[in-house]
């Protein structure tokens, strides 16, 4: 008789620090797997603690508490399938990123991570001790090798486990989304399958944690790189994978393969997921934002409505004497299309009071950006007051281009607890709005159709802080600015590189200067959804005081 093995994959969304709740989710899925006749249920990397924990995991009391929860989980899941779950392992003062195999009421095996990533958003060499390569373990008829996340990005761990008798590879992951990341993962996992000749199961986290969004898309590969299962992106999913022993070895039976969205949809889904989970995991259910009639706030309102439902999004228009009638009309049109509440609070009175209070100190000094910033800070003050009074989290609305060059007012329009579009350049803001107007998905809670009027997308961007102001008065046109920022930020290109690509040297130097002198603002800015591998925070860490400039 052909031997078989059912492995249940649990692509779930844990919360950092919610140890008991995360274990409770694991018990519930384990019970489902038992009812489905599973031999084992597999959860992602560091599922018990949530991921990433950052320095929290180095607190001995936290690591011990997580290990206690794992032991209790083993006892609670004694009668049924084995359970694989990620968590910290503290041993003689050394801390490991580990994968526990629970079976028969006990911890049957502990696999410790060998390769510790120390790039992009990862600082695991700061947190954990690298372990020796772990051998495989047996569950029922099957011998399983488990390279933990980064271990599978190198050939040595999988190769050693295969040589030690592993019959399949189970790879638990906490791999956050960035544009194009899925293709990179798939290419590397196909390489491991080709090198070892073994089936490979890749199970990833789903959901948002701080700035990082885990996109799921767990999958199963048979030898030869044949894809048998693909779980959906960004959402929780449970899949039963049936393996059978053949003369050539164990093979996964074909299963469901969810469609893989393009980069535009995946970026948008990441921003919606990040906004929803940052709010919910922080204990908030409602948001507030200043809706200016411009494109950035319109997109943030749409993302928030898709994430939380329009009824949980409160928009506030804060006009001054420089606010055009068109902006008032456009803000109203966006709120009406989304179905969000819109209030108007004029700032002219408070602004006049501040101007009067400062008049003795400003006597004889010409008007400049100071007066513009007062307007922005009045808006920030009023929005924060509404946030405090209503309990809704304030969202800030600056795109990556503005965040890069400091085209935002600290303690003004930068006020807020989260920024959904922080890693989205202005040129992509335009295209994302067009994309959302023509597409709707079941996970979007706002209405389908044109929710951002074309006039909002097509009009020249302006902060409306003085008469006839346009962004291009003080910045290069956004296609030029974003192309230069792509070089300086995303590619670490030199000034000479960009000049060789055809950009004006003076313009490149001005953008470089703005980028460096704005670091202190970014240090104080709200977190936002990470979409690239050069997001401002953990991906790109520069000193706030920096005298160096590229003069080549």
Image: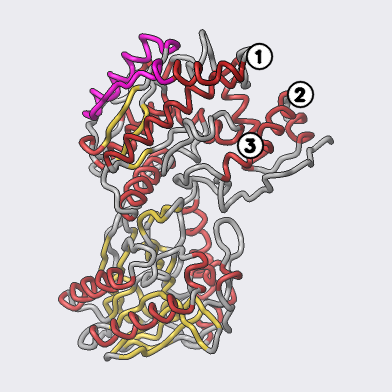
Judged from this view, the residue extending furthest toward the front is 360
Residue appearing at x 51%, y 87% in the figure: 91
Under tag 1, what secondary structure? loop
Residue denoted by label 2: 506
Left or right for 368, reference 62: right
Q: Quadrant of residue 393?
A: top left
Q: Quadrant of the N terminus?
A: bottom left
Residue matched to label 1: 365
Q: Earlier in the sequence, mark 2 or mark 3?
A: 2
* Res 247 quadrant in image: bottom left
Q: State the image coordinates of residue 527 (x, y, percent, origin top left).
A: 47, 46
Rendered image coloring scheme = secondary structure
Residue under the point 29% across and 79% down: 40
* Structural distance between the alpha carbons of marks 2 and 3: 18 Å
Q: Nearer the viewer, residue 75 or 497?
A: 75
Q: Percent from the top left, x then y, of residue 27?
A: 24, 75
Q: Nearer the viewer, mark 1 or mark 3?
A: 1
Local secondary structure at mark 3? loop
Between the residue at mark 2 and the residue at mark 1, the CA separation in whole angstroms equals 30 Å
Magenta span contains residue 367: no
Q: Which mark is residue 97?
A: none
Question: Contact, CB < 8 Å: mark 2 with mark 1?
Answer: no
Which x, y percent locates residue 344?
A: 30, 21
Q: Are marks 2 and 3 in contact (CB under 8 Å)?
A: no
Q: Which residues are magenta?
A: 321-350
Q: Residues within 10 Å of mark 3 (few under 14, many from 20)?
A: some
Say which of marks 2 and 1 sits in front. Answer: 1
Read off the residue under disc 3: 518
Q: Residue furthest left?
A: 35
Taking the image as drawn, is residue 461 in sight?
A: no
**Is 339 inside the magenta-drawn segment?**
yes
* Nearest to N terminus: mark 1 or mark 3: 1
């Amino acid at each position: 008789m052909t031997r078989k093995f059912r492995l249940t994959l649990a692509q779930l969304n844990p919360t950092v620090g919610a140890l008991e709740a995360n274990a409770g989710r694991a018990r519930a899925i384990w019970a489902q797997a038992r009812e489905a006749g599973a031999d084992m249920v597999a959860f992602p990397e560091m599922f018990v603690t949530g991921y990433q924990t950052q320095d929290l995991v180095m607190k001995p009391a936290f690591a011990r508490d997580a290990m206690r929860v794992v032991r209790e989980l083993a006892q609670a899941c004694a009668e049924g399938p084995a359970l694989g779950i990620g968590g910290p392992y503290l041993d003689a003062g050394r801390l490991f990123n580990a994968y526990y195999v629970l079976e028969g009421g006990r911890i049957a095996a502990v696999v410790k991570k060998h390769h510790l990533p120390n790039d992009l958003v990862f600082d695991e060499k700061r947190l954990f001790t690298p372990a020796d390569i772990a051998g495989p373990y047996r569950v029922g008829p099957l011998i399983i090798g488990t390279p933990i996340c980064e271990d599978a990005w190198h050939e040595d761990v999988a190769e050693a486990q295969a040589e030690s008798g592993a019959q399949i590879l189970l790879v638990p992951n906490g791999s956050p989304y960035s544009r194009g990341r899925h293709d990179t993962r798939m290419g590397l996992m196909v390489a491991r399958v080709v090198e070892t000749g073994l089936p490979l199961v890749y199970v990833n986290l789903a959901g948002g944690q701080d700035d990082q969004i885990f996109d799921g898309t767990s999958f199963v590969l048979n030898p030869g790189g044949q894809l048998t299962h693909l779980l959906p992106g960004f959402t929780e999913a449970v899949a039963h994978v049936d393996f059978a022993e053949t003369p050539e070895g164990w093979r996964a039976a074909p299963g469901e393969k969810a469609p893989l969205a393009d980069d535009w949809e995946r970026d948008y889904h990441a921003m919606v997921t990040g906004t929803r989970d940052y709010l919910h995991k922080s204990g908030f259910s409602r948001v507030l934002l200043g809706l200016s009639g411009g494109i950035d706030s319109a997109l943030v309102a749409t993302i928030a409505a898709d994430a939380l439902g329009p009824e949980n999004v409160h928009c506030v228009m804060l006009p001054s004497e420089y606010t055009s009638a068109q902006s008032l009309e456009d803000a109203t049109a966006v709120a009406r299309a989304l179905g969000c509440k819109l209030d108007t609070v004029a700032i002219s009175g408070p602004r006049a009071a501040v101007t009067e209070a400062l008049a003795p100190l400003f006597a004889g000094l010409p008007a400049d950006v100071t007066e513009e910033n007062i307007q922005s800070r009045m808006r920030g003050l009023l929005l924060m007051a509404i946030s405090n009074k209503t309990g809704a989290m304030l969202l800030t609305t600056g795109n990556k281009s503005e965040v890069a060059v400091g085209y935002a007012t600290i303690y003004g329009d930068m006020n807020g607890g989260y920024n959904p579009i922080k890693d989205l350049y202005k040129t992509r803001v335009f295209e994302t709005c067009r994309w959302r107007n023509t597409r709707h998905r079941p996970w979007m809670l706002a209405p389908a159709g044109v929710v951002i009027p074309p006039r909002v997308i097509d009009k020249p961007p302006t902060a409306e802080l003085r008469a006839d102001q346009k962004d291009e008065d003080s910045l290069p046109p956004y296609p030029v600015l974003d192309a230069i920022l792509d070089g300086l930020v995303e590619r670490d290109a030199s000034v000479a590189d960009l000049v060789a690509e055809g950009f004006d040297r003076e313009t490149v130097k001005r953008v470089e200067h703005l980028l460096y002198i704005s670091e202190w603002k970014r240090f104080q800015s709200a977190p936002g959804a990470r979409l690239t591998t050069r997001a401002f925070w953990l991906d790109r860490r520069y000193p706030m005081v920096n005298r160096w400039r590229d003069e080549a």
